[in-house]
Amino acid sequence: MRDVTCAISTFATPPLVPLCIIYGIYVQQHGSATPWDWAIGFAYAVFAYVVVFRLIIMKAVEDPHSPYPFDTEEMQRFDRLYRRRG
């Protein structure tokens, strides 16, 4: 267990390093994952982001008849943000 603690503490020295990056480096150094594991994990993360977070959750909380409507002027700010014309 001491070996794991020493390996992690060397990566934890820079401030605000996400734990998933530290864990990924540890897994890579110890050969715990094959390239297929990385590919499947990356594909799953993209799928989860697109389907679960962007589609399901955003559509579930969306309400066209919300009692808190946004002004047209406020919504036009997104046109400038995403460089839409019109």
Image (tube, rainbow, N blue to C red):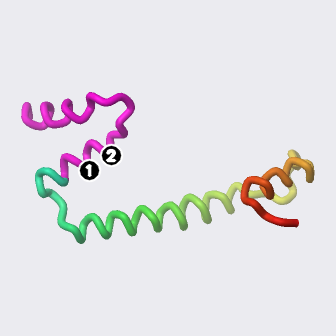
Q: Secondary structure at mark 1?
A: helix
Residue 24: mark in rendering: 1
Residue 23 belongs to the span the image colors magenta: yes
Three-letter code for the amino acid on which mark 1 is drawn: Gly
Residue 41 percent across, percent down from the top left: 33, 64
Residue positioned 82% across, 50% down in the render: 77
Magenta-drawn segment:
1-27
Q: Is residue 19 above or below residue 65?
A: above
Residue 17 belongs to the span the image colors magenta: yes
Q: Is residue 11 above or below residue 39?
A: above
Residue 35: mark in rendering: none
Residue positioned 56% across, 58% down in the render: 53
Judge by depth and name the residue closer to the eye, 73 or 61.
73
Residue 71 percent across, percent down from the top left: 91, 48
Specify few, some or many for label 2: CA neighbours under 10 Å numbering under 14, 14-19, or 20 or more.
few
Q: Quadrant of the N terminus?
A: top left
The residue that mark 2 highlights is 20
Q: Secondary structure at mark 2?
A: helix
Query: In the visual, does 52 lie left or right of 22?
Result: right
Query: In the visual, does 51 lie left or right of 60?
Result: left
Residue 42 percent across, percent down from the top left: 36, 64
Determine the CA span between mark 1 and mark 2.
6 Å
Three-letter code for the amino acid on which mark 2 is drawn: Cys
Residue positioned 7% across, 35% down in the render: 3
Q: Tags 1 and 2 in contact by the CB under 8 Å rule? A: yes
Specify few, some or many for label 1: CA neighbours under 10 Å numbering under 14, 14-19, or 20 or more.
few
Q: Quadrant of the C terminus?
A: bottom right
Residue 18 percent across, percent down from the top left: 36, 39
Magenta part mainly helix, strand or loop? Answer: helix
